Image (tube, coloured by chain):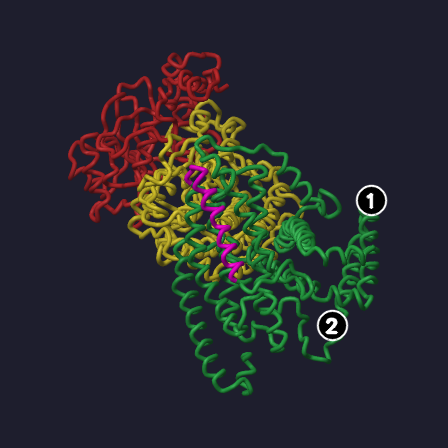
Chain colours: A yellow, B red, C green
Amino acid sequence: MPEATYLDANELVINMGPQHPATHGVLRIKLRLDGEKVLGSEAVIGYLHRGVEKIAENRTYTQFAPYTDRMDYVAAVTNGMAYVEAVEKLMGVEVPPRAQYTRMILAELQRIASHLLWLGTHALDLGAMTPVFYTFREREEILKIFENYCGARLTTHAFRIGGLQYDLYDGFEREVANFCDYFTPKIDEYEALLTKNRIWINRTRNVGVLTPEDAVALGVTGPVLRGSGVKWDVRKAQPYEAYDKVEFEVPIGEKGDTYDRYLVRVQEMRQSVRIVRQSVERIAPGPIMGKVGKVIKPPVGEVYHSIEAPKGELGPPSFVNLQALDTMVRGHLVADVVAVVGTLDIVLGEVDR
Amino acid sequence: MADEPKAPPAGGSSEPPAQPAPPAGGPGATPPKTAPPKPSAAAAKPAPPAAKPVLKPEPWSSPLLDEMQKRFPGAILDPVIFRHQPSVTVAKESLLQLCEFLRSDEGGEYTLLTDHTAVDYPKRDKRFDLVYHLYSFKRNDRLRLKVLAADGEKVPSVVSVWPTANWLEREVYDMFGVQYEGHPDLKRILLPDGWIGHPLRKDDDILKQDDAWVQANVGIKSGQ
Amino acid sequence: MAEHALQFLQANPLTYAVVKILIVFAVLSGLVAYLVYMERKVLAFMQARLGPMRVGPWGLLQPVADGIKLLLKEDIIPEGADRWVFLIAPAISVAAAFTCFAVVPFAGNFFVTDVNIGLLFILAVSSLGIYGIILGGWASNSHYPLLGALRSSAQLVSYEVAAGMAIVGVLLVSNSLSMVEIVKRQQEMGLWNVLVQPVACIIYVIAAVAETNRNPFDLPEAESELTAGFHTEYSGFRFALYFLAEYTNMVLVSCIAVTLFFGGWLRPFQSVRALDFLNYMPPVGLLGGAVFVFLLGRHNRVPMERVFFIGLAVVLVLLAGLVAIPVVLNAVQGIFWFTVKVLAFLYAFIWYRATFPRYRYDQLMNVGWRVMIPLALANLIVTAVLRYFLSSHGSASPAARLIGF
């Protein structure tokens, strides 16, 4: 750094990241500050860019499936699910009900796991260090179920094009039901720590407000969009798998601030438990693979498929949601940047791909 | 840009070249060879296991399409529907007006641009398909727009219609080298600013990289 | 031998003072090291985990290992830093923190010195500690430390005012600035100041948390915002000095709070004859500790650790026996209660950290200027007015006695 830069600048440009405790990976944000006030921000991304699309060009459909897990690596199940569903749609394959319910159970558990990770780290960013240990404790139970099912905890590669590779193991249903019973009171526990905590409310209310109009214009999806009061969930609007056969609600926020998004995600965890409970009840013996050949060879064509991933409509939500950052932090303080980055719930593996 | 939604279309077009690629090797040589057998092979093979699904895109007709054709005569080409997903190709000149129309009340309120990406067909004269995926909350309906563009051709930016296109177009520019007109800040987004090359073009080999940049900035010979 | 030594010390007050300073310094350094251990353990138990377990039995040697590690690490000075200021800043922080203990009465019979402006001395010297933070942040010539230092100074200025005014309320009641006198006054009243000046007590405790940069007021080093705040560029031994200063300050404000509001070295309910059995708490407490350690270590799988725990239990029992001797019991009575109260405060500090999110900078200022300072001012005025009227009616009235005039 050249000399004479001590205090002579009115406008301070600081670099948040790519190595920074609160940027959730290798995100870099260039902040222009006036004191502590944010005048503008620019997200610099690409530090984790692996060129997934190029890899896809050089792999067969089956070979590429595991790569999808490495994008949003904290929600690998839903990523893989979106991919296999897209290929199935292209081929016109029908997935048997047992496989559908299994996928839903695992996907909803994954949503809970992803939200737990978000809740813990978001609270940690705002200085509450205890929730992260509690949420990881519960997330661990979900990862154990994943591990029992497919042998992997994080990058699961749980599904195959056309259905499932493995049938459920003995006691899966009981384990999942036990988890639901165990988990519901735990959500109350997190809420007891945060929801009515005055400092928590102070830190999140009216921070990073996104009006419904802005939210749609910026293309954000998922809990960020619903936190702004737009009641839209792909699971409801254009159901895939068997989401049209289970009952659940789509929680929405009112003001579109960080606190609303917190409430929405906490409510979503409760709704996910509901979906899991219903799916476990309905899951019946039967085939687990649809009619697909040994070699996956879909017809030439183009399909668009999206699902409701934990972070938004898959394609890829973190990338699009991150774009809203500048709108949300302008005029706020440095501490709020951390809150907003947290509330967007981004995963850099998915932003950069 | 798309990881999930994009992978199938990109894969769908590139998969046949990719599979015979290892023996053939040269990226320039394979696509023409495999392109002709593509439709027949695809139509024949998956047909026996699943006879029901429609395998070929069918012509699409809807009141919205009629309205579009009425307002933009000659600009709406090749309206098809495949797997219940309507898709139209749009003349580049009418893109902005059409987008504004689709976003407006009478156009069906396609207020959400869920994705924008590109597909590269290197042998074609206009090699890029620029794909826009729109969604309307009111109609609960998706619509795909396509614009054809040649290498170096300027395409109007839709950032003024959907602000979210900002980063999406930057990524397409970064990965394919498509030039947008009227984009507020068109620069690379994932790759570093000084990088040379556009990796998602089909004629870019997967092992290719900007060796000079890597050597200058990372200080290693290659990224392998 | 012992008598000789005592006589020598009494004959040479300077040597006596030096010996006392050395004792305080040594004990305090050890206490601070183990305060870090206590913090990690308490936090861990609140967060469903175990904390340090590897170095020594139950991780008891962790502070030693940490100390050695920090001493041996490379001392990095950034290129653009203002070298001398950068080097001196952490020393200022530590020196200020330790100096204040010169006037803290650990017991009625043990303090380094008692000056008649003790409280003023503490306020003055502890405020100097902020220079260490500001200079350190500024000299690093880096953005995050600078922001941390600015936050720290703003925070300290705001909360120092509130704390100062809360303390003045105590002064009005106590009629003295001497720390020893303040405790003695509470003894005469038979009431701790916390009951006489509850508002002042609450304000002081909150301000104390803010002044020590502890959660929920830990903005100067908010790791998720400013990486490490003012000490981002510090490493090794100098970082350890800042660390030491922070925890020493924690002990210091706890000591002040105990002295001003919680009767210092006085036993709880000293004026109640029926509770005199509490005088035997020191040996009983040690015995309890012995039982706890014994139960903890009895089933330890590692033979060495089992031996250690049982040995520790035996040592504690022997200590309890020693303390039970009336002469010794009298001597340690004050220091025992003082330590217990300070530990309770330190525990609360850790508890806050496990519970609260962090305030934002502007919110912190709002709380400081719009709530704490007006409240402290109101408390001060009410106390002053009451004192004026009550003392003019003579100190015989029951109401006057109640608030201590």
Question: Can residue A174 be seen by looking at this rendering?
Answer: no
Residue B143 tag number = none
User: In the figure, is residue A224 to the left or right of C296?
Assistant: left
- Say which amino acid is labelled 1: Met
Q: Is residue C307 left or right of residue A141?
A: right
In-image side of C71 versus B75 (left or right): right
Whichever of labels 2 and 1 marks the residue nearer the N terminus, that label is 2
Task: Say which residue label 1 marks.
Answer: C304
Q: Secondary structure at mark 2?
A: helix
Image quadrant where one finds the N terminus of chain C: bottom right
Spatial CA distance of label 2 from label 1 is 36 Å
Q: Residue C22 placed where, x, y %?
A: 67, 50
Q: Chain of mark 1?
A: C
What is the crowding at mark 1: few (fewer than 14 residues within 10 Å), some, or many (at least 20)?
A: few
Foreground: C267 or A104?
C267
The residue carrying mark 2 is C278
- Camera-nearest label, 2 or 1: 2
Q: Is residue B73 visible?
A: yes
Q: In x, y percent, where is residue C269?
A: 67, 75
> Magenta span covers which residues?
C120-143
Res B192 → quadrant: top left
- In x, y percent, where is residue B163? 28, 41
- The residue nearer to you, when weighing C27 against B148, is C27
Q: Residue at x 46, y 51 (%)?
A: C219
- Whether residue C138 is in magenta: the answer is yes
Q: Residue at x 48, y 63 (%)?
A: C163
Whether C48 is among the magenta residues is no
Three-letter amino acid code of the residue under disc 2: Leu
**Depicted B47 relative to depicted C369: above or below:** above
Name the subunit of mark 2.
C
- Measuring 84% from the left and 45% from the top, which residue is drawn there? C303
